[in-house]
């Protein structure tokens, strides 16, 4: 019987209706009852470490979660983190970078409907998360709607549907069928290296989604505010305008001032490629880093994590040139 620790952080799965909307509860009886039912298959321990709507989960909470997971890993066969869906993909991506080379499963899950509701998807999502531990799906994953997705590739794509997450630019790790769990892909892991915790991050990272006509002076404002890193969601394969409002020129100024700039695409699928068009090549010449096929969530959290490890822009570029857990394809 696998020994599993459930770390609760709040979210819809444990929420009930309050006077001003849904509010997470620390230990709703329906959740404890479900875990009791599942305990005939698993040796389950339950611990509440946070009780937040995931919109309130930020870098301080990521550090707490990572530290709790890292300390518990040697004592369990796997860890399940119950979490709100809204920022689950950000947390999963960040844990991928904070906890380097884990030897056991770390699975995030939650639900679109509270576990107290008769139509809730919570029980099946919890069962899917536990199945990942049963099958020793090493590393950080998200378990949702009978799917297992790499934590650094998952994106929330629906606000109401049960199929809330998709694995972007990477196959699902596994799927649940009537005849059991089908594992579809393997994980990258550096054999022989120990699991280490690197929880330092920088909050001085901004995400800018371009629209036609974006004023380049907004980049001056970001620098004056003290941001050390910027992720730009550009058009298509990596273009941004330079006629009348020269964004690439301002990006160059930021890079020369020591700001690490990562350029990704607004398109959900496939990669950015700044070498294709003139509008992209101008950006490439600024010294910006290409996100290629990374998700926005992975690009943002990787930049925050990178700036927590070093303030040297050249070292940040080396970090982005490293594939830690399948978050990028070169």
Image (cartoon, rainbow, N blue to C red):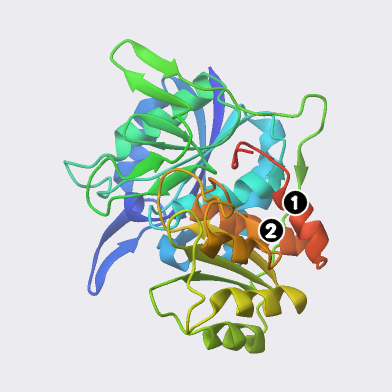
Residue 181 position in % (x across, y down): 40, 17
Which residue appears at 58% of the width and 88% of the height?
A: 221
- Disc 1 crowd, CA 10 A, few/some/many (<14, 14-19, 20+): some
Residue in the foreground of this view, choosing between 190 and 73: 190
Q: Is residue 153 left or right of residue 164?
A: right
User: What residue is pinned by disc 2?
Assistant: 305
| Residue bearing mark 1 | 319
Residue at image position (69%, 44%) is 99
224 vs 102, nearest the viewer: 224
Q: In screen coordinates, is 278 left or right of 235?
A: right
Relative to 101, is 99 above or below?
below
Furthest toward the top, the residue is 179
Residues at discs 1 and 2 in contact (Cβ within 8 Å)? yes
Q: Nearer the viewer, residue 234 or 280?
A: 280
Disc tally is 2
Q: Answer whether residue 26 is visible to the viewer in this image.
A: yes
| Relative to 101, residue 315 above or below | below
- Badge 1 element: helix
Could you tell me which residue is drawn at 60 percent across and 42 percent down? Answer: 328
In the shown orientation, is residue 322 left or right of residue 245? right
Query: Residue 312: where, in percent of width, then height?
Result: 83, 66
Q: Position of residue 95 (x, y in %)?
A: 61, 48
């Amino acid at each position: 019987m696998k020994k599993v620790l459930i770390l609760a952080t709040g979210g819809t799965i444990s929420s009930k209706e309050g006077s001003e909307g849904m509010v997470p509860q620390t230990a709703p009886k329906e959740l404890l009852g479900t875990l009791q039912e599942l305990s005939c298959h698993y040796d389950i321990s339950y611990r509440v470490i946070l009780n937040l709507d995931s919109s309130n989960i930020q870098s301080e909470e990521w550090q707490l979660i990572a530290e709790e997971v890292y300390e518990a890993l040697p004592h369990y066969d796997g860890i399940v983190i119950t979490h709100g869906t809204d920022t689950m993909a950000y947390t999963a991506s960040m844990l991928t970078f904070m906890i380097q080379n884990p030897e056991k499963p770390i699975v995030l899950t939650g639900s679109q409907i509270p576990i107290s509701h008769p139509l809730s998807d919570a029980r099946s999502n919890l069962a899917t998360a536990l199945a990942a531990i049963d099958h020793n799906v090493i590393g950080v994953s998200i378990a949702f709607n009978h799917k297992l997705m790499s934590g650094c590739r998952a994106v929330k794509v629906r606000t109401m549907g049960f199929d809330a997450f998709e694995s972007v630019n990477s196959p699902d790790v596994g799927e649940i069928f009537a005849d059991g769990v089908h594992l579809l892909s393997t994980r990258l892991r550096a054999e022989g290296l120990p699991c280490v915790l690197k929880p330092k991050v920088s909050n001085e990272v901004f995400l800018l989604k371009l629209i036609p006509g974006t004023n380049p002076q907004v980049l001056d404002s970001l620098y004056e505010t003290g941001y050390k890193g910027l992720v730009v969601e550009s058009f298509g394969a990596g273009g941004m305008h330079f006629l009348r409002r020269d964004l690439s020129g301002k990006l160059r100024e930021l890079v020369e001032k020591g700001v690490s700039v990562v350029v990704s695409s607004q398109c959900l699928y496939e990669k950015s490629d700044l070498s294709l068009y003139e509008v992209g090549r101008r950006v490439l010449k600024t010294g910006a880093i290409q996100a290629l096929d990374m998700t926005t969530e992975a690009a943002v959290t990787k930049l925050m994590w990178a700036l927590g490890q070093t303030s040297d822009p050249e070292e940040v570029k080396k970090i982005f040139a490293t594939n830690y857990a399948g978050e990028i394809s070169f």
